[in-house]
Image (cartoon, rainbow, N blue to C red):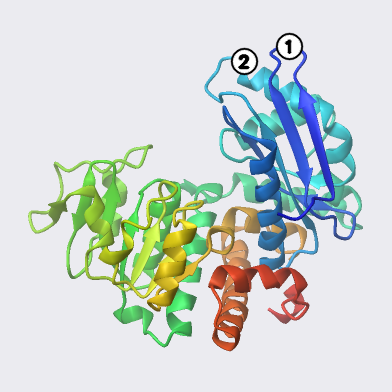
Amino acid sequence: MKQPYLSTEWIDPVTGAKGYLVIDEMKAGFCAGGIRMRKGVTKEEIQRLAEIMTIKMAGLGMTVGGAKGGIDFPPNDPKSKEVLKRYLEAHTPYIKECWLTSEDLGTREEDILQILSELGLNSSVQAFIDKQENAPSLLKELQKAMKARYDGTALTELVTGYGVSVVTIKSLEQIGEDPQQAKVSIQGFGSVGASAAKFLYESGIKVVAVADIQGTIYKEDGLDIQLLLTLKDSKGLICRKRLPSDYEQLPGSKWLEVETDVLIPAGIADVINIEAVDKIEAKIIVEGANLPVTKEAEEILFQRGILVIPDFIANSGGAGLFVSVLNGNVEGTPKAIFQFLGDRLSKTVEVIFSIVNKERILPRMAARQLVEIKEISPKEV
């Protein structure tokens, strides 16, 4: 692992919890990355995530470096918000000058924004906004985007899944497959998996299997995703009582084994491991979750001609919401943001596949080269 530009360590004076800020790179005076809170988080984990953020920003066409904040504290502890406030207070100088941040695992955007407001900041990306000539309009459009809704759902809950759907469709096209003839199987029906299924379904693509912790729901000629969305709860569990009689209910692991062209793991980490690779016959795996495919499994799958599109490209839609407004200068409306993400991620996937085809390397390795590539600036999208 390369050495980061800057790494800090903070100790909460009340609870003794440790916190970190790692800036992987600074570009044009800025870096970007959310704040993670979980018991057991380490500086090494935050450093790796900061490096990934550098690649994610490059893939989205924004000239900022990667960063990540981390707090070693249980997010469900009653004191967690107080700990977050003291962490933010200690790191306010970075947020004012160079660090664009947001929520991550274990933190909520509304808590971050409320605390920053109490600390005299208007936004979690104030450093960037304050240095732009059109600062007032940028802030207005970003606030509009954060409050926007689409089909009755908050836009912030949809953009990551939308990005996964775009990457899935474009990846199929890049390997010469007709998306309209393709079949998709998804593991996880939370905000990412459900919204990816929604947008794929609306694009005319058959989602043949969806798995939650209760098992796999399967229909060979495609599930009615609109129906499943009405049957899911806030935790992504699908009520089985109202499923059509021709829907098969299979064990949870069967989502990996059904006849499909694309697998989208959008639930837990390491779900596709070395024990699972022999069961997989899909052509592409699109990582909706973080780290769902182990390194060993990815290498074996690549040898078999099965490509894994890495998480830091596939699930970058959340960061893309910010990028669309801040760097793309689009209106903070769902239509404009979806258009930006569609164009941006499609172009990025094209570049990744051109590298894969030329150098015969893993898509993950090709995606890392985006940091050095100049030709995919937003102007070319």
Q: Which mark is residue 85?
A: none
Identify residue type, mark 2: Lys
Identify residue type, mark 1: Val
User: Which badge, 2 or 1, comes first in the chain's sequence?
Assistant: 1
Q: Residue at x 56, y 33 (%)?
A: 106
Q: Position of residue 341 (x, y in %)?
A: 60, 66
Task: From the image, tell me which residue sits under label 1.
Answer: 14
How many numbered callouts? 2
Q: Is 315 drawn above or below residue 349 in the view shown?
A: above
Camera-nearest label, 2 or 1: 1
Left or right side of 131 for 13: left
Left or right side of 304 for 68: right
Quadrant housing the N terminus: bottom right
Q: Position of residue 170 (x, y in %)?
A: 49, 77
Q: Is 280 drawn above or below residue 118 in the view shown?
A: below
Question: Distance of mark 2 from mark 1, alpha carbons?
Answer: 10 Å
Q: Is residue 78 visible?
A: yes
Left or right side of 277 for 359: right
Q: Residue at x 40, y 74 (%)?
A: 306
Local secondary structure at mark 2: loop
Q: Residues within 10 Å of mark 2 (few under 14, many from 20)?
A: few
Q: Quadrant of residue 64?
A: bottom right
Local secondary structure at mark 1: loop
Q: Quadrant of residue 373?
A: bottom right
Q: Position of residue 231 (x, y in %)?
A: 26, 44
- Nearer to the camera, 134 or 212: 212
Q: Position of residue 301 (x, y in %)?
A: 40, 70
Task: From the image, tell me which residue sits under label 2.
Answer: 79
Q: Mark 2 touching mark 1, by CB under 8 A?
A: yes
Q: Is residue 117 visible?
A: no
